Amino acid sequence: MKKINLILKKELRTTLRDKKTLITILIPILIYPILLIFYMGFSQVVQSDLTKNESLLAVDNNVPHDFLVRLEDDPIIRVSTVSPNVDYQSLEDINARISFKSVKSGEMYTVHYNSTLEPSQQSANRIEEHFRDYEETIKSTQLKEANIDYEFENVVTIQEEEISGDMMSRVIAMALGLIFPLLIVLYGIIGTYTISSDLSAGEKDRETLETIFSVPIKRFEVIIGKLLACVIVGLLSGMINILALFPLAYAITTNIPELSISISFPLFLYLFLMLIPIMILTSAVFIGIGFISKTYQESQSYGSVLFIGFIALCYIPLVPNLEASSLTLSIPITNALLLMKEAFLGSYSLIDTIKVLGINLAVSGIGIYVMNKLFQSDWVVFGGKS
Amino acid sequence: MIKVENIQKKFYDKKSGDIYALDDISFDVNEGEIFGLLGPNGAGKTTLLRIISTIMGQTEGNITINGFNSKNQPEEVKKSIGFLSGNTKLYKKLTPVETMRFFGGFYNINKRVMNQRIEEILSSLDMHEFKDKIVEKLSTGQVQKTSIARCMMHDPKIYILDEPTLGLDILTSRTIVDFIKKEKENNKTIIFSTHYMEEADLLCDRIGLIHKGRLVEIGKLEELKEKTGKSNIRDIFLFYIDQESVVL
């Protein structure tokens, strides 16, 4: 164990001194907070604009006085009266216009606004609120004059209750439950892919394998030390991603309280647990490929094909209506992502978790076995040069 | 000290079938002796030294080093030897001190002895100036000194040196030659391969000539001169290579 530890420490030390690897691992720390700042800043700006900005309204001078006074009393509405003959397009800096005509049934108002412009849409909404109040006041006065109880209108009362919760919130929760684990796993795989070629084919290129084989250490110990280094970098990459995502996920769930997602420590612990076998599997495969390859570039080329294969497995859970089933839970990597999604939605299954961990660890075991077999061959390790 | 018996190394190639990199090689090296292995490129020197060092396994034959069998006790063999070759590269992101500490860690050397050993080697090879610079920033000579330091860490009884001066300039080569001479004074056993005839002439007690995977002659330089009637090692070498070509 001491020798494996020596290899592991050396690999980590040399890996973390490599700027390329460091940048790859640390990118999420930079990207997610920037995204978070944008998200927070943007929503704050939008919110403050919407609530504080004044609505500039052009109101035809034939609009009834009672309604006009209502608008003028609103502190965030500024009214300019215009002649009904003036064209709306010619009015500058106006968010909306109200025109009026009397009809047989009563008063008819037309609101002109541009729905593609947020201030214009906001002004139309404010006008609508005033219309509702104004209409209620008129109705109430007329009913009172006719000596009819105002409540007679409410013959039927309808109360709606959505038993599946807010649909939109659920859709957002599902999307986050798919995207967050996908990002975490993808980043972990990128971490293992980044350093595996360096640990295997890179050693061949630099001709340092002969050096390490000249000391009293078994090849199996060398390979396990390398595998652990690769797994740790993958996990570190995934962990950094989880930690960097935390504020973003927290901000989203705080801003949308109806979301059925609980961002908690056990959730992150669960994500981390599910990530471990995936990192072992991808590390073993990438390192194995690295040893078969004659050069670092060759290893990167073969690795990129496998990388696409792993990404494909990661994307399977995005298929609409795909749920955890015996079939989907037997597909390595995909199974873990499906359970991660369930965990995001607050649903944990101990049996499925054990099953998925078992399947992924078994496949990883096969990967390690093959990798070790390759590493025992002089022909593979010394690239056939001898 | 080193007993090599009937070593054969066979590789399989899809196109060519079985390839014999080494065929029936046998020789002994005594304690305190410098044994030179001479041969042209591709003769099998590197493969033979890798097999002796247990870096690579043999197809047939036995090797005993310091009383340990290379097949059954590879770790004990590795503890007895220090392996260095012209191709032995170091980890570029480690400093010389970290390199020594890393490789020393495999020999169960306790911390106090390790620190003392590092200090001794740094002084003897004059490495203090660059001991904390990472290897990729060192000059060729400084890298080669670090390589020597690496294989000296466990104070081995035997050194196996595969073309240690290959591609080095005259000053850097001198560091290696001085190191070999100094270790000879310390009664260390050394096998080294080279195709620099003058080097072999200068350092070796006995010489083995290897060609196309076979050991074609072995003996002291004087004995070989007498046998072949040649006055220098270069001519002796060419004599045997020509003779082998005629036979083959």
Image (cartoon, coloured by chain):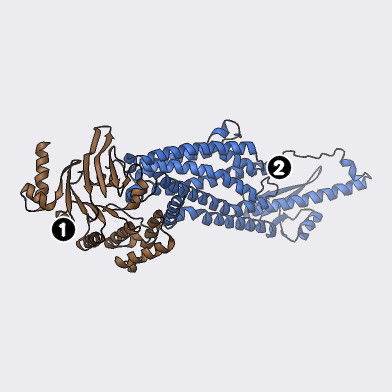
Q: Give the class, few, some or many, for how many residues have Cα within 10 Å of label 1's Cα (few <14, many ≥20).
A: few
Left or right: residue A155 compared with residue A215: right
Chain identifier of the residue bearing label 1 in the image: B
| Position of residue A382 in the picture relative to residue A119 (left or right) | left
- Residue at image location 81% in from the left, 40% down from the top: A159
Viewer-proximal residue, B37 or A50?
B37
**Chain letter for the part of the structure drawn in blue:** A
Residue beneath disc 1:
B202
Residue at position x 12%, y 48% from top? B237
Q: Which chain is brown?
A: B
Residue A335 seen by the camera: no
Q: Secondary structure at mark 2?
A: loop
Q: Residue at x 60, y 56 (%)?
A: A42
Q: Hey, what amino acid is under mark 2? A: Asp
Marks 1 & 2 on one chain: no
Tell me where residue A157 sits by quadrant: top right
Classify B204 as above or below A330: below
Badge 2: few (under 14), some or many (20 or more) residues near its Cα, within 10 Å?
few
Front residue of B16/A176: it is B16
The image shows residue A147 at horizontal and vertical percentages of: 94, 45
Q: Which residue is mark 2?
A: A166
